[in-house]
Image (cartoon, grey):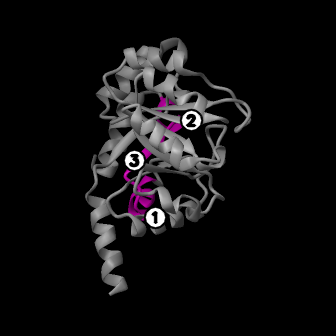
Amino acid sequence: MRGLFRELSYILGMSLKQIIAPSVLNANFLELGKGLNAIENGGAGLVHLDIMDGHFVPNISFGPGISACIGKGTKLPLDCHLMIENPEKYVGEFAKAGASIISVHAETTNHLDRLLHQIKELGVKPAVAINPATPLESIKWVLDIVDMVLIMSVNPGFGGQSLIPYCLDKIRELRQLKPELDIQIDGGVKLDNILACKEAGANVFVVGSAIFGTADPEATCREFVKKVGG
């Protein structure tokens, strides 16, 4: 019976829409409009915005102002990943900036349930993110609230890192818990490992340097989309 449930979970997970979500953190900001056009034409389903504050993670990126500008430059939904302390203070600003999805880290708040409902009340899809060493148990009770779970497959803060293999086991476990849930993987996703990510149960794939670090981001994005059948 358990084997049957696992097989059903796998089938349901694989039937979810497969989405490539390029991270513009790795784009050339001097030609960001061209980069956004490239991933639109390449078949991306989301624009992933990595928001870093230099406290929760050892790097600083950009805030709601730049996010709003990016939103004006693309037809794609904005997927805002808040790697920041005190996210309760800022989710409203990112909602105003045009976010379609806001992911908050379970590690950054003492009141995760309240925060996720706060995002939902802003008319934005709530998502929860966890770092590689954070157990799934920490988000077990909010899985019915969120539209997506983001599994970090690198330690957040910098691009270009290698995927941590045990994070695929976390995705498998989560897919069994919630077969119908969108599961996003973020960190070290490349053409040579994206199918392993999909087979583990992920269906939303954040890709940064593996797209924007190539000579033809549009063609590379299209290759990623084709690879997962998106």
Task: Identify the residue position indicated by label 1 in the image.
Answer: 174
Give the quadrant of the N terminus. Answer: bottom left
Task: Identify the residue position indicated by label 2 in the image.
Answer: 82
The amino acid sitting under disc 2 is Leu
Q: Name the spot of residue 113 as percent of width and height, x first.
A: 52, 49
Q: State if disc 3 and disc 1 touch (CB < 8 Å).
A: no
Asked whether residue 201 is drawn in magenta, I would say: yes
Label 1 crowding class (10 Å Cα cut-off): few <14, some 14-19, many 20+?
many
| Residue at the image position 51 percent from the left and 62 percent from the top | 140
Q: Please indicate, yes or no, whether residue 188 appears anywhere in the rendered image.
A: no
| Residue at the image position 28 percent from the left and 73 percent from the top | 8
Answer with left or right where residue 6 lies relative to residue 54. left
Q: Please indicate, yes or no, whether residue 138 appears anywhere in the rendered image.
A: yes
| Residue at the image position 28 percent from the left and 67 percent from the top | 11
The amino acid sitting under disc 3 is Val
In this rendering, the answer to whether 174 lies above or below 206 is below
- Disc 2 from disc 3: Cα separation: 17 Å
Task: Identify the residue position indicated by label 3 in the image.
Answer: 204
Identify the mark nearer the N-term, 1 or 2. Answer: 2
The amino acid sitting under disc 1 is Leu
Which element type, helix, strand or loop, lies under badge 1?
helix
Q: State if disc 3 and disc 2 touch (CB < 8 Å).
A: no
Q: Which residues are magenta?
A: 194-214
